[in-house]
Image: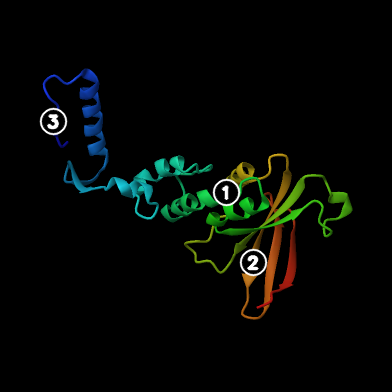
Amino acid sequence: MTTLTPLLPPHATQLEKTLCQATERLNEILLIHTTEGNDLKPSVRININQLWDVDHCPEKFLPWLAWALAVNVWDEGWSEEKKRAVIKNSALVHSKKGTISAIKEAVKPFGVSAHVTEWWEKKVPIERRKPYHFYIDIFVDTNLSQKDFPEINETFIANLRQVIDTVKPLRSTYKIAIGITLRLESKLNMVCRMSALPLLRSTFLLEKREQ
């Protein structure tokens, strides 16, 4: 551990001495350490300005940056790229919180897109028109690289629900369905829509996309 020489005068108060010790500890925190044999040695000093830059903030400080920027859902199991994407997206999501747009933006870092249908829209059957209820179709793009392709499991669904619950209109309820989008070389895209876990049914739709 690096020992700093205090510059306090002999008549320094106890409060000033305590603050000096606290800032000395901060000096140690802002060092990235490497292991050399059995010894732990400091190697790189972090510029404190980097801690507020999501692109340059060291990975070990990302949870604190996420907390400072009011990220609502966080999972230490996420990849570093996903953590940074969620933090970057936080300000935009908060600016739209309580709207359908916020839902669409909030799920993007998960490698999916959301199509939201509200209860009053004509395409919703009359028997399904529950006031303040909406339907969310979550689509995963199969053309994503293996690295970016999300693993669809119960944890993934739970994280999505947490994110949606924190940004949706408070009075609203919803139903979620998961599907995949197959992008073909022609003008036709194939969309497979499945009910959320457990997967009980699937419907294949062909949608013509205008180029």
Give the residue at x 77% y 45%.
132
Q: Which residue is mark 1?
A: 95
Q: Residues within 10 Å of mark 3 (few under 14, many from 20)?
A: few
Relative to 66, does residue 16 appear above or below in the rendering? above
Whole-number angstrom distance, CA of label 1 to CA of label 2:
29 Å
Give the residue at x 82% y 52%.
120
Give the residue at x 36% y 49%.
59
Q: Position of residue 56 (x, y in %)?
A: 34, 54
Whole-number angstrom distance, CA of label 2 to CA of label 3:
64 Å
Q: Position of residue 88 (x, y in %)?
A: 47, 53
| SS under mark 2 | strand
Q: Which residue is mark 3?
A: 7
**Quadrant of the rendering where the N terminus is positioned:** top left
Q: Position of residue 194 (x, y in %)?
A: 70, 58
- Type of colouring: rainbow
Relative to 6, does residue 139 appear above or below in the rendering? below
Amino acid on which the number 2 mark rests in the picture? Thr
| SS under mark 3 | loop
Tell whether 8 sits left or right of 153.
Answer: left
Q: Residues within 10 Å of mark 1 (few under 14, many from 20)?
A: few
Q: Nearer the viewer, residue 8 or 104?
A: 8
Give the residue at x 16% y 45%.
37
Amino acid on which the number 1 mark rests in the picture? Ser
- Disc 3 or 1, which lies upstream in sequence? 3
Circle number at residue 181:
2
Tell whether 51 sits left or right of 9.
Answer: right
| SS under mark 1 | helix
- Disc 1 or 2, which lies upstream in sequence? 1
Question: Disc 2 vs disc 3: which is toward the camera?
Answer: 3
- Disc 2 or 3, which lies upstream in sequence? 3
Whole-number angstrom distance, CA of label 3 to CA of label 1:
45 Å
